[in-house]
Structures are given as C-alpha cells and as structure tokens.
Amino acid sequence: MTVVGVIGAGMVGSSTAMRIGEAHLASRIGIVDVREGVARAMALDIGQALPSLGSDARVVAGWEGIEGAAVVVMTAGLPRGPGQSRADLLADNGRIVVDCCRQIRDRAPDSVVIVVTNPLDEMTSLAQRVLGFPATRVIGMAGTLDSARFRAFIAERLGVAPTSVVALTLGSHGETMVPVPRLCTVDGKPLPELLPAAEIEALVQRTRDGGAEIVRLLERGSAWWAPSAAILDLVRAIVCDERSVHPVCAMCRGQFGIRNTYVGVPARLGRAGVVEIVDPGLKPDEVAALRLAAEQVAARVADLGGVLGDDADERTSAPEAAEAQLRVGVRDLAYASRVRAAARRELARRGQLHRLEEVVQAALRRTGA
C-alpha cells in the first residue's frame, strides 16, 4: 500500500491531493490542516470525486492519515498577500513548518518530504534540520514550477505549443531565480536563435514575478493549479522510482562549488529522494549566478535559529549529521555573502565593479572561507 500525505488543505494542498488520486499514485491519501473541519471536508469531497475518475484511493483526514507515508507534501503556511515578498513570511511560516515536521518525523519516519511552503528555500532548509532526515529525502518544489512558467511564457510569446518548449530555471525561488535561456529550446531550436536578448530577459523577469503576478490579480491568495501540477511531477518521480531529472531545491555538497546549502538544481529523483545532482552543462557565468543565489539563501537561513527553539540541538545525531553540516555551510556562505556585499559597495564607489570576483575570491582565500 502506498500512502502519500498532504499537509495543508488549502487550494494548493487540496488540488495536490486530488491530482495524486486522479493519477493513481496512492492507495491512501492523508490530508492534514490546523483547521480540522476543512481537512475533513476536503477528504470527503475528494474521496467522493475519485470514484467517478476510476480511482479507489482512500482519503483520510488527520495526522493518522499520513502514518507510514512514502511521500509527504508540505503545503501548510500563510499565502503571500499583494506587495508581500516570500521572505516576509519567514518567521510565521517557519513556526508552522517546525510544528508539522515534529509530527512527520514521528509518523512517517521513512518518507521523502517535498516542501512547498514559502519562502521555499529557507523552509526546505528548516524542515531538514527539524526532521533530521538525510538531506536526500527532503527537497523543495520550486524549479519545476518556475520552469513550467518560463515554458508557458516562451510558448505564448512565440505562438507555439507549450509542449514543444523545453525550459530550465535554477537558483532560488524568488528574486535570485536563475533561468538558463541558453539551454531552452523550441522544437529543438535554441531560444537565443529565436528571440533577441532583450525579449528573453523580459520573459525571464516575468518568470521571476510569475507568482506575484497571480497574487496581484487574485487580490487574496496565490496560485494553486500550476504548483499542484509541479508537485504531481515530483510525487510521480518518487513513488514510481522514475530516476527522472527535475529542477528542485536540493542540498548541494560541493556541486557547482556550493557546500551544504539548499538551492535549486537539476536532480535525479527516485524512491529514496535525490539520487544525484546533475550538471546540465552550466557555463562559468551561470555557475556564478547559482552560487550567488545559494549565498543569499544561506544568509537568510542563518536567521532561522530563533524559529527552531528546542529543535536547534535536538537532532544532532540524525543521519549524515545533517544539521551540523548545514550549519557549517550556512556560516561559510553567509560570510561569503557579506564579503561580496561589502566588496560591491566599495568597488562601486571606485568605479571598479569589473574587479568584483577577483576581490571577493582574494578576500575569501585570505580568511580560508
């Protein structure tokens, strides 16, 4: 029996549960929400809908529904409001993630956890620290959604079928997203051969702002259809042990020069979570952008200690000593981020920004960072 748990019965969580049932990926789907009546209502509604779609999956409300789950999807948290950034949600959603992870690690200790709660990169790091699971079993859903948005915008601009477009975004889920237009194709043709750089950059920026655009239009709440479709891709890859490659928020342990930090990278997914992180053939400037995104994530993760409470030291005996390793990476990259910021200010004052990488690397070599 395959069990998939969904934490959060809002629009993203409930549509995710429905998609999982429709796709016949679970024999039991557990739905949990702090609003117990909402979780029960969604369990009843989805459970009554699935037989019409040929699915026999049972839908169970409450924490007992996720007992022994193979995959748990974390969607619980406050949505963004108009004008609010993902980072604005850090403390409030951090507390929600901590409380939910305490339940997950007891009820589904062998699960792969997919974090969807914003701010995505920080919440994925926080979840892994509290769970104490190997980092390969805790990932964030970001690049899959961002790549789908980039793909849709490219198709709209060129007037082609979205299925003819291959697109890739890496980095942070937000302002430091790193779309890679060079690796995007339309019917096999490289995107830079079809559009001028200025138009590609406009599509890149719209992709970065894709979630905020929907938030503004809705006025209350945020996107759910595209996120739940992206989540389904990841759940399928894990439950079916596909070994397929997806852009996800995953722990890097030296790949791309990034140590012990969660950031969006291509990862091969299977039943045990991340099988390997895959290099799609990034060029030095693309790697530099990815490292910058990782540095900024690490700096923000360094502020999460107050959210952890007693869990800050509780899980130090976890597999891979995951939390201790993460702390080392956070210190390294947070320091590197401060060095870069200080160097940028000083070099801008001198009109020498072209020397930024040279100065930063020299400073880090001197300190051994």
Image: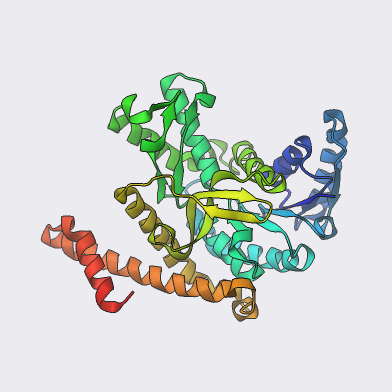
Residue 103's x, y, as percent? 75, 66
- Residue 285 vs residue 155: left or right? left
User: Which image quadrant for residue 257?
Assistant: bottom left
Residue at image location 39% in from the left, 62% down from the top: 295
Q: Is residue 168 above or below residue 323?
A: above
The answer to whether 142 is drawn above or below residue 136 in the figure is above
The location of residue 172, given as percent across then percent down, is 45, 52
Image quarter of residue 199:
top left
Would you identify the image quadrant in which residue 298 lies? Answer: bottom left
Please tell me which residue lies in front, 154 or 272.
Answer: 272
Q: Position of residue 237 (x, y in %)?
A: 65, 44
- Image quarter in which the C terminus is found: bottom left
Q: Is residue 165 left or right of residue 40?
A: left
Rendered location of residue 147, percent (x, y): 49, 39
Residues 166 and 243: in front is 243
Q: Is any atom of residue 118 visible in this view?
A: no
